[in-house]
Amino acid sequence: MRLLVVTAVAAERDAVCAAAGSGAAVPLPGGQELRRSAGLPVVLDALAAGVGPAAAAAGTATALTAAALAGQPYDLVVSAGIGGGFSPGAPLGSVVVADAIVAADLGAETADGFLPVTELGFGTVAHRPDPALVRTVAAAAGASAGAVVTVSTVTGSAARAAELADRHPGVLAEAMEGFGVAEAAAAHGVPVLEIRAVSNAVGPRDRAAWRIGDALAALTGAFRTLPGALTAPAGPAPEPPRP
C-alpha cells in the first residue's frame, strides 16, 4: 500500500515521520519535496503542503499527479496535523479521525444566516471517508470519530465556536486543510482520511493554554498505529442469523 500524508507545516510532517523512522527526500514539481519512510508495512510519503485549503489542495494534487505519472499511484491520502478541539468531545491531547471532512465557511452569508454552496445550487461542502476504515483507524489509535471542519479563518471567539457547533452537530475538531486535501483526492479517485491531534480548544484564543508539543506527540502515536490498521487482515464475515 502506498500512502500520501499531507500536513500544513514541517513540524506536523516531522511528527508523522517520527512514527515511521527517517525518510529520504523525494523532489516534487514546483520545488516541494516528500519525505519517504521505508521499512514499514506501507510506503509512507509525507508532504508539508502549506497552510489553508488552497495550499493543501495544490500540494496534494501535485503529489498525486507525480505519482500517477510515475506509474506508482497512491492508495490512500491522509490529511494530518494538529487542530482545535470542540469541548467536551475532543479534549487537549486527544486524537480525532474524521467521519466527515466539511468546508465550514464555503458558501454565502444571507439575511437568514449562512448558506453552504450546496444550498446555492453548486459544489460540495463535505467528503465522507469510508466508515469501516474510519472505525478501524480510530480504534487502533484510541481516537474519537466525528466531523472535522475546515476553516480559512481560525475560530477566535466563543460565539463563533457555538455557531459552528450548532451548524455541524457532533463536530469534534477544527483545522485548515482537510477539505482541500479531500477535494484533490476525490479528483484523482483516491480515498481520503483526516487525522487530527488536539492542541487547543476551539474558541477564544489563549496561547498559554495551547499544548502543541503534546498534540504533536499524540499525532506521532496515532501514526505508529496506522500502518498496522491499514494492513491488518479483515476479520471473518459474520455468520447469518439462525432461523
Image (cartoon, rainbow, N blue to C red):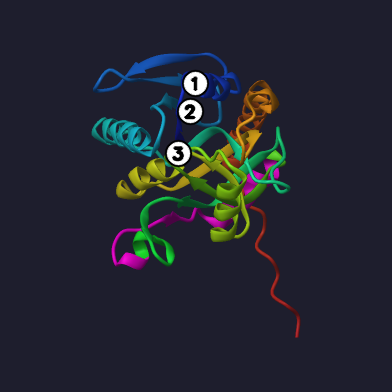
Q: Quadrant of residue 231?
A: top right
Q: Which residue is mark 3?
A: 153
Left or right: 81 in relation to 185:
right
Neighbours of disc 2 within 10 Å: few (<14), some (14-19), many (20+): many
What kind of residue is marked 1? Ser
Q: Which residue is mark 1?
A: 37
- Numbered label attached to residue 81: none
Q: Which residue is mark 2?
A: 44
Which region of the structure is painted magenta?
119-140
What kind of residue is marked 2? Leu
Q: Are the residues tagged 2 and 3 within 8 Å (C-beta)?
A: no
Distance in Å between CA atoms under marks 3 and 1: 32 Å
Neighbours of disc 1 within 10 Å: few (<14), some (14-19), many (20+): many
Question: Which of the two labelled residues, at mark 3 and mark 1, occupies the earlier sequence position?
Answer: 1
Distance in Å between CA atoms under marks 2 and 3: 30 Å
Q: Is residue 54 magenta?
A: no
Question: Which of the two labelled residues, at mark 2 and mark 1, occupies the earlier sequence position?
Answer: 1
Residue toward you, 220 or 242: 220
Residue toward you, 50 or 105: 105
Q: Residue at x 61, y 23 (%)?
A: 19
- Rendering coords of residue 20 (x, y %): 57, 22
Question: Which of the two labelled residues, at mark 2 and mark 3, occupies the earlier sequence position?
Answer: 2
Mark nearest the camera among 2 and 3 is 3
Q: Residue at x 38, y 52 (%)?
A: 106
Q: Residue at x 58, y 42 (%)?
A: 157
Left or right: 120 in relation to 43:
left
* Residue 152 seen in the current view: yes
Residue toward you, 109 or 90: 109
What kind of residue is marked 3? Thr
Q: Residue at x 72, y 40 (%)?
A: 91
Q: Quadrant of residue 68?
A: top left
Mark 2: which secondary structure?
Answer: strand
